[in-house]
Amino acid sequence: MVPKDLPARDPPPPLIRDRSLGIIATATVLALLYFARDVLVPITLAIILSLLIAPLVRALRRLKLGQTLSVLAAVLVLVLSFGAIATAIGSQLIHMADNLPKYERTLAHKLETLNTFAMKRLNSITAQASKVFDRNAQAVPPSTLQPNAAAPKTPIPVELHEAPANPLQVIEKVLGSIWVPIETTGIVLVVLVFVLLEQEALRDRFIRVAGGTDIRLSTLVINDAGDRLSRFFVSQFAVNFGVGILIWIGLSVIGLPHPMVWAALTTVLRFVPYVGVWIAALCSAVLAAAVDAGWGMALETLGLFAIVELFAGQLVEPQLYGHTTGLSPLSVVIAAIFWSWLWGPIGLIVSTPLTLCLLVVGRHIKAWSLLDTLLGDTQALTMPQRFYQRALSADSDEIIANARKFLKRNSFADYCDMVLLPALHLARLDLESGTISTEQQTRMRASMLAVIASIDGKNRRPSRRRIRSSLLGQSTVGRLLRQQREQASGRWQGPLVVPAGSVVVCIGLGTIADDLATELLVRVLRDQKVDARHMSLEDLDNAPPLNTADAVSIAYVVSAFPSEERSRGEATAGKVRARFPQACVVAVFLPGLLLQPEDEEEVTSLRSADQSAGSLGHAVQICLDMQSKTAPG
């Protein structure tokens, strides 16, 4: 009981309690996986084999053999296939064992030659170093032993020999060495048969246990995992088997003894991610060096493995199943280390499918979404978030590289709408909350300037002196980019004598983001051969003295994202209409990141505007449509 004079302790916060329970649950699961591996490994192998031969079972069922006969026939085919392969490999291993003394002598001679050739200089260097150290070493005192002292007696060597084993002991030793693999194989086959026979019932039980209240989600998870694993296993087995056949043929042509052994080893080890095939290549090269008096066969063997693996990994696999697993390369490597630590060599082979199951769970169950983020090959950050993060780190080169990759499939307007302006909105939100420093603002501004000047289609790169002076003067990016164009084409960014309806003006509502969005719209329009010009609110009172009153065909009123400045959008539109009475007023009110769907129509339009656009791409399309309607013919 708690004493009355002591206050009762408050219960731990829910977040800490949930994290503690999560840590305890994770430790419990790891302990079960490790200590119950003798039971879990055969079951896992049986489930994996069931996914591998599931297409064969379905094909036999289509032949009207029935569920039981189809399963038994498929398992029998599997057992006979592996038995035949094991028998052939065993016979070749016996022949290889007979020639091991010869191989050992050849390899020892080569190693001795290599040591003589390669280690001669090293030994010379070591000898010179020893002489230097010997000069500085102190002299060893003479021995104090008496000259007539008795020499120590030489010990008599004693050898122990075991008694020859009788036949029963030999049989017991052989059975003891092969009993564990036979037992595991038997358990795997029995579980495999029952998994295939009870496939539908097992699926129903899993749905009942895992998600009985949400059958749709549980069915989606099971189907996704089953399809992914089945496709992956069948495709990978086909590729590995094909690689083994090519290695068998190539080694036979080269003349390496027992090529079937190394082909089978390659097929099995290729299930180990990244390093398995090279382990087989190294073993084959060692045998080639032991067989051939020279080094030609070993080099040919390594070349064969390199060519076949390059062909299979870079051409066949991407075309056959590509990235259907959805796992990132790093997660595959880490999973291989983790599962091999838990389950040994078997865990190394089954690491990819087990990790794939975790990935599927993370993608469909919200509570496990962390697994999708850690294991999946999808980008952890969105494109605007990546832009913003790189800009804060002043990594303009990576931003430009990603932008050019994006622009190979999309337009500059799409990049502004999908990446650049949302990233600018992220910076605005951090600026309003006070979490971005002045130095980070400077980095963001410099990155924006470098990226826009590099990818707007004109390959213009501002000088470093100009960038620094503008940043120190707190000039906005949009204003700086506009000044660069004014230096090239004059105060009004183009000629004053123009045809009627040939000029488009873009006016921002006054914020730094509005200024940049307006400049981006001007650049996108100019890429479409439109005479677009950037004007500020102050320029409306002193507009360019164009030669005709109807020179301006479209006047854009631009706002980057919802802000207080949008409240004066109606007044700005009225001033624009009064200054350019013949122009079509288009409100380009971009939605931003936090806009709710029910509020979109209200904040992305003006009542006094002729048309409205919610993106730069839509705004450009409005201009192109109007030009096509007014074009002659």
Image (tube, rainbow, N blue to C red):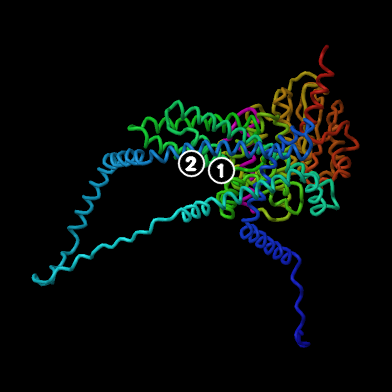
The residue closer to the viewer here, 137 or 530, is 137
Along the line of sight, the residue nearer the viewer: 85 or 332: 85
Image: 214 above or below 137: above
In the image, farthest residue toward the left? 148
Please give the name of the residue rendered at 56% of the width and 50% of the height, measured from the top-left corner: 337
Disc 1 marks a residue whose amino acid type is Val
The answer to whether the residues at label 1 and label 2 have Cβ atoms under 8 Å apart is yes
State the CA–CA distance, disc 1 to disc 2.
Answer: 10 Å
Expressed as whole percent of the image width and height from the top left, the position of residue 614 reads: 81, 36
Q: Is residue 5 left or right of residue 78?
A: right
Alpha-carbon neighbours of circle 2 within 10 Å: few (<14), some, or many (≥20)? some
**Against 624, is 275 above or below?**
below
Q: Which of these two is toward me, 211 or 343?
A: 343
Q: Quadrant of the C terminus?
A: top right
Residue 272, disc: 1
**Extent of the magenta region:** 437-462
Q: Main secondary structure of the magenta part?
A: helix
Rendered view: 407 above or below 436? above
The vertical placement of 321 against 374, above or below, is above
**Amino acid bearing label 2:** Ile
Q: Give the residue at x 84% y 19%.
A: 629
Specify the label residue 279 is tagged with.
2
Quarter of image, res 466: top right
Helix, strand or loop status at disc 2: helix
Is 440 contained in the magenta span?
yes
Residue reaching furthest top?
A: 633
Quadrant for the N terminus in the image: bottom right
